[in-house]
């Protein structure tokens, strides 16, 4: 499949099969994230793979949606603002760098027949405490991961190029 076809295949999955994800596939999606570019190649990220049912339930309580609890894996994406590159005007690129890595992970997952969904509306401080993370790490996103319950990719409404591109 072409890269453009892969971008069309990747969508926010909110229904997962009760099927474990093979460790080899987990390693492949994490490798894709590891290979993502970052400002000055600092790679200010850390990923926590949660498969333990007890810990997963605690993390899921920070975003109380039934569909989220059913995912067999949750990847907690953290950024290290203490290490990340800052532009001369102070702009911190940690979130940008992590966003690139997360999307590499999500595209790799789609390529392997897995689904993900960016979750940002969760209690980050509570999640940080549950996972007993050091102060330098910020939990930026939660990514449920698993086999999509539905095989058909839903139609995605996208703006036209004319709405998002200016040529000069």
Image: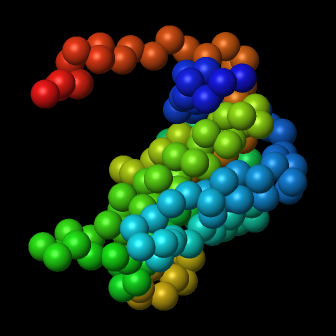
Q: Residue at x 52, y 52 (%)?
A: 102
Q: Residue at x 36, y 17 (%)?
A: 158
On screen, residue 17 versus residue 76, left or right, reads right
In the rendering, at what x and y percent does residue 58 appear? 58, 64
Viewer-nearest residue: 6 or 47: 6
Viewer-nearest residue: 153 or 50: 153
In the rendering, at what x and y percent does residue 61 appear? 51, 57
Residue 14 falls in image quadrant: top right
Say if 56 sits above or below 153 in the image: below
Residue 126 falls in image quadrant: bottom left
On screen, residue 22 versus residue 162, left or right, reads right
Q: Residue at x 29, y 17 (%)?
A: 161
In the rendering, at what x and y percent does residue 130 appear? 53, 75
Quadrant of the image for the N terminus?
Answer: top right
Task: Determine if residue 128 is in view.
Answer: no
Quadrant of the image for the C terminus?
Answer: top left
On screen, residue 69 versus residue 27, left or right, reads left
Viewer-nearest residue: 158 or 41: 41
Say if 35 sits above or below 91 in the image: above
Q: Residue at x 56, y 58 (%)?
A: 36
Residue most extreme to the front: 168
Task: Determine if residue 30 is in view.
Answer: yes
**Colour pattern:** rainbow
């Amino acid at each position: 499949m072409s890269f453009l076809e892969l971008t069309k295949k990747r969508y926010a999955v909110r229904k997962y099969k009760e099927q474990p994800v093979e460790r080899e596939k987990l390693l492949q999606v994490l490798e894709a994230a590891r290979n993502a570019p970052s400002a000055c190649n600092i790679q200010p990220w850390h990923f926590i793979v949660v498969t333990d049912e007890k810990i997963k339930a605690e993390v899921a309580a920070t975003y109380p949606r039934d569909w989220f609890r059913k995912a067999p894996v949750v990847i907690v994406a953290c950024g290290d603002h203490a290490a990340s590159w800052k532009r001369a005007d102070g702009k911190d690129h940690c979130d940008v760098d992590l966003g690139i890595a997360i999307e590499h992970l999500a595209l790799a997952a789609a390529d392997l027949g897995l689904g993900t969904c960016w979750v940002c509306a969760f209690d980050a401080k509570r999640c940080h405490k549950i996972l007993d993370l050091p102060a330098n790490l910020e939990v930026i996103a939660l990514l449920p991961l698993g086999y999509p319950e539905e095989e058909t990719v839903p139609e995605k409404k996208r703006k036209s190029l004319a709405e998002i591109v200016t040529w000069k």
